[in-house]
Image (spheres, grey):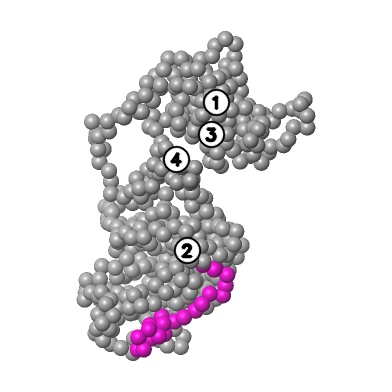
Amino acid sequence: MSHALSDQEIIRREALQKLRALGIEPFPAAEFPVTHTATTVKSGWQEPAGEDAPKQEVTLAGRLMSVRLMGKASFAVLRDHTGDQQIYIARDGICPGEDKTLYDEVWKHLLHLGDFIGVKGHVFKTRTGEITVHVEQLTVLSKALRPLPVVKTDEEGNVHDAFSDPELRYRMRYVDLVVNPHVKETFLKRARVFDAMRGAFQDAGYIEVDTPVLQAIPGGAAARPFATHHNALDVPFYLRIANELYLKRLLVGGFDGVFEFSRNFRNEGMDRTHNPEFTVMELYVAYKDYRWMMDFIEGVFQRVATAANGSPKATFQGKEIDFTGPFRRITMVGSIEEKIGMNVLDMEEDDIRALCMKHGVEVAPSMGKGKLIDELFSALVQPELIQPTFVTDFPVEMSPLCKKHREDPRLTERFELFVAGFEVANAYSELNDPIDQRERFEEQLKLQQRGDDEAMYIDQDFLRALEYGMPPTSGIGIGMDRLVMLLTDNPAIQEVLLFPQMRPERFDQG
């Protein structure tokens, strides 16, 4: 994609050269000693005790967002990472002696919206009551060679020329963050969500760890991996689809509780709740089961929601979601039976396939009994699960890493947490019987041979680790991107990822 310079870009490049001709470096290397931000200027303001009271001196830096020229003086808005700050610049205030170049040439003609400047001055309050910085020194810090989109709001509150096209916003997130302040707030909340969850686990005594992204065997989930090649070892590797099997190895090694915020990669479709690169938090705790995990995670979710929004309640797409426990609990098979009046656990695979077709659920020949039941649940039950709901006790075919149910061996001790109609977390009483685990892996291999490219591989080293003994364990994976969606009222996962995957642009290399 070639880029012909616009008139505005030509003007800015000419201004760049004129600044240098005046002896002003548009991209200086020296440190600019900031003492205040937009937030601290406002929070630190105090009415002067009298005319002779000392002035509050401040130094701040940011991006120039608007200018109102009024002859020999101007008001402008400077934006830093905390928000906007009004500044006042008078020609006689920043220009010493007879030389008025800094105001008449640089400020009025060679600086543009989007440029970074540093200012030093004192704080005062205007007649309209706005806290403002009276600039006494001005420093050019960085020249913007492209103009920002100018988003305007009229007197009726209507927005014009908004930078709102999703493809442009995702491709140029750096522009999106500048001109759409609410977008930045999403990612500030995302940081609070991660911090609150990390704090909850650390307070419980669990250890944060790191496990490999490059894996010889992509295990821990049913998904299609991204393949790569390790040149030094001359062997194929995969980007991890999950970190589960490595974290369980650590339980074998003697850790009692470990967690990791894991960047995972799954070579699958993209929609409003799926992105091929995403973040999952996985936690494994020894001597616990999935019933304990339900109780524990209720408290974690309430803490995280409160950290994000100041309350355990959040509004998502017009619906209030309440993360105050206890959450509703239903079984997967029982919830399907409520819809169709039949117990799918007692049915043969072909009968379940016919049932799916009857209810308009698309199926494929490679799907086994477990996947068919999952598809049926996804179509008939899942969309109605708006408030936080634990769906428990999945058929054994769906859960090759999960312990069989203590009361019905056709089921597993597993739950998924659904909110607003989609899955947010998945948890097990972890399978620690190496013989049973080997048999489950072998069943997955049969599904691979039927054409299921998401079936699990056999991880011989993981089986060997289990043979050394793993304590009874409960584990959970939480989809962090989906959780942030819920807590920031964003309907698409791309809105809560700073740089979601896009088809690459073509640039002119000439």
Q: CA distance from mark 3 to mark 1?
A: 10 Å
Q: Is residue 440 magenta?
A: no
Q: Which residues are magenta?
A: 321-342
Question: How dense is the environment of label 4, judged by Cα within 10 Å: few (below 14), some, or many (20 and up)?
Answer: few
First in residue order: circle 4 vs circle 1: 1
Circle 3 — which element?
strand
| Spatial CA span between label 3 and label 2 | 34 Å
Please rate how many residues cluster around mark 3, counting C-alpha atoms within 10 Å: few if below 14, some from 14 to 19, many from 20: many
Mark 4 or 3: in front is 4
- Separation of residues labelled 4 and 3 (CA atoms): 14 Å
Query: Which one is earlier in the sequence, the residue at label 4 or at label 2?
Result: 4
Q: Residue 406 versus residue 42: which sits nearer the camera?
A: 42
Q: Earlier in the sequence, mark 1 or mark 2?
A: 1
Q: Residues within 10 Å of mark 2 (few under 14, many from 20)?
A: few
**Label 2: which residue?**
318
Mark 4: secondary structure: strand
Residue nearest the observer in this picture, 52 or 400: 52
Residue identifier under label 4: 152
| Residue 402 rendering spot, x and y as whole percentages | 41, 76
Residue occupying image coordinates x 55% and y 38%: 84
